[in-house]
Amino acid sequence: MVTVALAGNPNSGKTTIFNALTGSRHHVGNWAGVTVERRSGFLELEGESIEVVDLPGTYSLSAQSEDERIASRYLSSTEADLIINVLDASNLERNLYLTTQLLELRRPVVFVLNMMDDAERQGVSLDLEMLQSLLGGPVIPTIGNREEGIEQLRKALQSVIQGQDARIRQIPVNYGDDIEGELLKIEREIGRDEHLASSQIPRWLALQLIERSPESEALIQASHAKTAITTQVNSSLEFLEAHLGADGGTLLAEHRFGFAHGLVTEVLKRQPLTKRSLTDRLDAILTHRWLGIPIFLAIMIAVYCVTFVLGKYPQDWIGYGFSWLHQEAAAVLPQGELTSLLVDGIIPGVGAVVVFVPIIMLLMGCIAFLEDTGYMARAAFIMDRLMHLMGLHGKSFIPLIMGTGCNVPGVQATRTIESKEDRFITILVSPLVSCSARLQVYILIAGTFFKPIPAAFAIIGMHFLGFALAMIMGKVLRLTLFRGVNNPFVMELPPYRMPVLKATFIHMWEKGSVFLSRAGTVILAGATLVWFLSHYPGITNRAWTAEYQSNRAALQVMDIPATDRDAKLAQLDLTHESRIMNTSFAARFGKLLQPALAPILDPDRKRPEAWKDGVALTAGFVAKEIVVGTLAVVHQASAQSSSTDVRVSPLQDALRNRSGLTPLTALAFMIFTLIYTPCLGTVGMILKETRSVSWTTFSIVYGLGLAWLLAWATVVFGRALGFA
Amino acid sequence: MSHYQLTHLSDLEPGQEATVLQVKAHGPIRRRLLEMGFIRGAHLKVEKLAPLGDPMELVIKGYHLSLRREEGSCIIVSMIEPAGA
């Protein structure tokens, strides 16, 4: 089968061309071993199926970033038969830099001049015939977001694939006599190693060696001609430096831009513009010195509301749906372990996964929209100063701020950060940002142990603490584990464009389905494991089950008012659940944890019920709001007030009067809940986004360590200051 | 007749124009800057600074680019002062 690779600069509209060529039939995966998405799809040309691979958008093939390494390796391999080079017609000169490298790859190239409408608006007219003969390949003008020119592109692909296109002449850039002479010499040395010369394109390898690219130097390490090649490269570079007064990289870049500039002068005519462009006018406001930040914050609030306020409705429907399913299944199916696995394990587990889908799709949709309009780059431009102070990137701001709603889509939003190091640091610190699930725990604990005003301060304080820790840890990670990796912040500010809603929807759909298939499985597996740990071995105890069922039956026939009966039934359910929970593996685990948690939650070693905290925190790993539900079960006290005029729920009463927690240890409990390990959903997402078990483990372990340390410090300092 | 004045790119004020003389960075940053168009003789114009003072926005090779001061300080430029200034 013929394979076509799509290459082009970021913001050249490559994805719209990809979508237009392949329709919606495409597959999203990952490039082998890395976190970069690989999109491929199929195109029918006269009954023949052709694979189209969308390469990451890059400015060059110099293999510095992960994206460039992927594009460069893929194009140097024999996988692609044909390259489509998507060029932004309104920014031709810079886009042609990548073209000068593509022309070295000895593959037919079809050029797509995209965004022709933008170019026309800028008063640019292009001599396509001339461009075609200078580039040595068909040049197809398109307007990707209106699917204009796609038919012509298909025709050109057809004729090139059949080898009938007279426009294909492969003409590499001429680097001038001096450089060309040295390139030949290096090629000759590469030729000494037949294997190397046949697996690589010798001239392309020679060019990369002249640029001293680490990737090419690694390639020749294994060669027996290594010494000969290295000696030649060194003497060539010495010669060039002496004659042309610059290093290899500079010389090649100058010639490439020289070629691009020459070409643009030949083919492009520009009419003087009478008015400022739309982008200039918008930027005058959107990145304005005083208005820039308020507008940015307003946009963030809008995105937050769309995601978490609007997203709450489908989340609630999903919640009702699953609890209805839970009840129906529990009522219909016979009591037993399998039923419990289904009703208490799998149904809530699947629910716990699906409930993330609306917010993931909404947030990813908003981000894709902002990215496609060009505003995302401005957001990074506005926030970079602040984020750089904490060792992060301007683009780290959005994932962190969205993390206050939920860390799961927050972690996924780090996808917009290009450099791997910046992205990983952001992923690792984002679980420290307090999410809305943790808020439920704070409300319970602070409401129980503090008066209303201090409680409000404690809750707000948790959010500030989360942000402060994210900042500090960002800086710490930058200075330790990610030391020495310095990613330049050289970011294009693309022109503002109207996004294509179809592309946004395709993107949302992809994000939702990729989440379900990758992270969803991890979350479901984890939820099932926690169900097992918190129900066994008690659930197999026949005597307890029999006792529970007979008590239930007795209550149901008792002649008392319906409300009383419901309350008694609920209490009975809770007692039964509590009995199972308190003898479960999770409870044993909680008891095992007790010595480790004692310094923070039981500093005087006087609390008989301290193990219950451990159980609740263990269960809270699935989702932090579960801490509340589990506390209710282990303390056998409902989290809901029995009537509206009693403000303290039985659980709050139990916590305050029986659990032995003091205001100080309660505060430590809140701090511990804030920091200790990302929840299961976030862990699933971290694993999906880093594709690294060790980084995922690291994020769990450092969270636990940091949580313990801070909670412990709170108790020690608190006691020293006389609090209890 | 315009005057020449050597300076670091990071020292330019919004509105000022210059041509690139040399990129002093090494390794990946140098390559990135070269690829983005910071080659000898390239003309550039500083558009504005971000609201917090860093990074800066400039126009080079006909497109808009943003750059931190940190990176700007390793680019030596020759300032083009408007005639008569």
Image: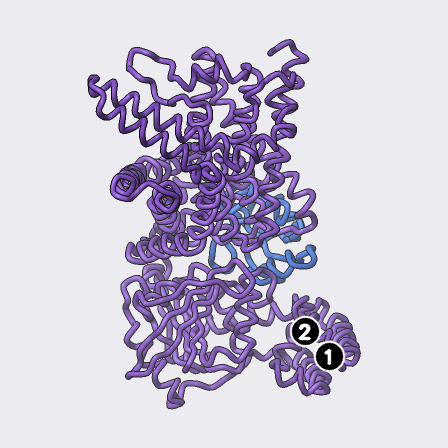
- Label 2 vs label 1: CA separation? 8 Å
Q: Toward which corner of the image does residue B38 lie, by quadrant? A: bottom right
The residue nearer to you, when weighing A379 against A515, is: A515
The residue nearer to you, when weighing A236 against A194, is: A194
Q: Chain of mark 2?
A: A
Q: Chain of mark 1?
A: A
> Where residue A168 sits: x, y (%)?
43, 85
> Where residue A8 sits: x, y (%)?
46, 67
Residue pictured at 56% horizontal, 52% vertical: A490
Residue B64 in sight from this viewpoint: yes
Residue pictured at 29% horizontal, 72% vertical: A149
Give the residue at mark 2: A219
> Where residue A633 sits: x, y (%)?
43, 27
Instruction: Tell me, yes or no, whether the two marked residues, 2 and 1, touch with CB atoms within 8 Å.
Output: yes
B17 sits left or right of A225 in the view: left
Give the residue at mark 1: A223
| Circle 2: residue type | Leu
Q: Colour of chain A?
A: purple
Q: Toward which corner of the image does residue A27 lie, by quadrant? A: bottom left
| Circle 1: residue type | Ser
Q: Colour of chain B?
A: blue
